[in-house]
Image (cartoon, helix red, strand yellow):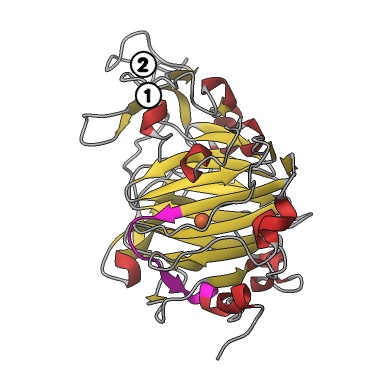
Amino acid sequence: MAHYQRVGDVPPKRHTQHRDPDGSLYYEELMGEEGFSSDSSLLYHCNVPSAMVDARTWDLPDQSTETTAPLMPRHLSLHGLFPGDGWKGVDAVTGRRLVLGNADVRISYAVVGTTSPLYRNAVGDEVVFVESGTATVETVFGLLEAGPGDYIVIPRATTHRWVTSGEEPLRLYAIEANSHITPPKRYLSRFGQLLEHAPYCERDLRPPASMFELVETHGGDTDVEVYIKHRGVGPGGLAGSVHVVPNHPFDVVGWDGCLYPYAFNVDDFEPITGRVHQPPPVHQVFEGHNFVVCNFVPRKVDYHPLAVPVPYYHSNVDSDEVMFYVAGDYEARKGSGIGIGSITLHPGGHAHGPQPGAIEASLGAERFDELAVMVDTFRPLEIGEAGRASDDGEYAWSWTGGRRS
Ligand SMILES: [Fe+2]
């Protein structure tokens, strides 16, 4: 983000002495992307940020994937992955189950009832969509309050944890990139400001609130574990480590810069509509390397007198398409068993579109009450253990009323 923020106690000049009330120096850390050549922030720590006293490996949740052959559209029911009250012991980091993934992005799902360990993803940025429930995301940059419909965007290597009361299930749809995740570049000025035709602007982004409270709370903690996901030779090219650090990482008294986690609520996305059907890129909200994130929000639909409001059949010749159904009625999928918590995977190489009868049923509609989050990947997706466990095996035949030869 090129949107400058300044929070807490920061010296007037960068790279100069900054001292606490007792005269001790704070420790300046630069977090910067692309080798000091892109967005960065300067953080001021009470303690040395590189100090550690132990390290061990962390066996990541199953990151293995299998090819989706034979090529088929699929329906995955994520809500069945966490049956009963088993979610109460699940946290937002170690409890994620891998649904789909490739070398650019991984999609996981978790129903969470307990606070996560401290965590940083050193592989890429994460955007975690909150399907339901609430949490506080504590980060070295400060606090983000998370609730239904929030995207929590967390830059690579940001130490954080998900704090939840466990009173209700916290449902999280985690999109982990191997790259950075940003607003679509076509919506940004050459200096990085969101332009007038963008469906959201800087006012809609919620930066972290002050972390002073965290610094005071954790000032006396010692030998704290931090779980790190990083590049390695395990499944998906990933590995995990746990560092034991002698002081709590939430010791930042101030920071400033253009690199930080933030929240954006899907209700603040202003849909772009037209007289005839608008193509999916109008629904785009973020992008990473080789993938995009789009959202389909409640909206007025196409108002040409002869408009067909549901999508035309389309063959995404360059992408696999993953739709996650969050709320409302999804008009194009009526009669296919798709419901809240479903995923459809429409792979490249196979045209897809409305289920039988959906076109006729949509004629004359003025509004769609639907909420869905879509990830389109430009390289083929493979299916993870949670994807295999939630596949209904029937969706491919839904355009023929369930008939297969
Ligand atoms: Fe599609």
Near-viewer residue (22 or 400): 400
Secondary structure of residue under mark 1: loop
Q: Which residue is mark 1?
A: 26
How many numbered badges does the structure rendering display?
2
Residue 2 sits inside the magenta stretch: no
- Residue range highlighted in magenta: 376-387
Q: Where residue 88 appears, x then y in whole percent?
A: 71, 64
In the picture, the quarter occupied by the N terminus is top left
Near-viewer residue (136 or 198): 198
Disc 2 residue type (three-letter):
His
Q: What's the residue at 58%, 81% (across, down)? A: 393
Q: Which residue is mark 2?
A: 18
Count neighbours of disc 2 (C-alpha within 10 A) and say few if under 14, some if 14 to 19, many if 20 or more.
some
Count neighbours of disc 1 (C-alpha within 10 A) and say few if under 14, some if 14 to 19, many if 20 or more.
many
Q: Where residue 360 appears, x then y in whole percent?
A: 71, 57
Q: Residue furthest front?
A: 306
Location of residue 369 (image quadrant): top right
Secondary structure of residue under mark 2: loop
Location of residue 24 (image quadrant): top left
Disc 1 residue type (three-letter):
Tyr
Query: Answer yes or no: do the residues labelled 2 and 1 have beta carbons within 8 Å?
Result: yes
Q: Where residue 145 appears, x then y in whole percent?
A: 64, 36
